[in-house]
Image: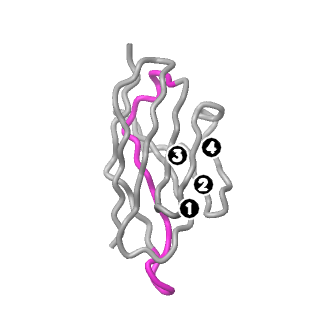
Amino acid sequence: QVQLVESGGGLVQPGGSLRLSCAASGSISSINDMGWYRQAPGKQREFVVRITSGGSTNYADSVKGRFTISRDNAKNTVYLQMNSLKPEDTAVYYCNVDGRMSARRTFSSWGQGTQVTVSS
């Protein structure tokens, strides 16, 4: 099994910053893509950003230039630096990690979610 533990959410004023972390642990042989998604109240979960094992990134248009994803492969951890936050960024943020537990077994795990609230 692979577990993801998220941290770093909270309440911040518009224009402020937060940094989310997501650490993967368990039976991990290798990790491929890591990413972040979010779900606002009354809305479907949406894509925010992903990063490949090689470091290539893909951002949703709504966060380009404000959010930055990074990863520490030695720690099996992915980060999301969020700057210039807006009220519309308010959501529960979920990390997602894809990888392998063995040569024949893959995994795709989700974190428990962390609340980000942007409000004055």
- Viewed as shown, does residue 86 lie left or right of 112? right
**Residue at (34% x, 31% y) in the render:** 10
Q: CA distance from mark 1 to mark 4?
A: 13 Å
Q: Secondary structure at mark 4?
A: strand
Amino acid type of the residue that numbered disc 4 sits on in the rendered structure: Tyr
The image shows residue 107, relative to residue 76, as above or below, that is below
Q: Secondary structure at mark 2?
A: strand
Q: Are marks 2 and 1 in contact (CB under 8 Å)?
A: yes
Residue lying furthest top? 120
89 inside magenta stretch: yes
Q: What span is colored magenta in the figure?
A: 85-106
Q: Which residue position holds label 3?
A: 47
Q: Which residue position holds label 4?
A: 59
Select label 2 or label 3 by which is in front: 2
Q: Secondary structure at mark 3?
A: strand
97 or 17: which is nearer to us? 17
Residue 29 on image: x %, y %: 47, 77
Residue 117 on image: x %, y %: 37, 27
Residue 4: image quadrant is: bottom left
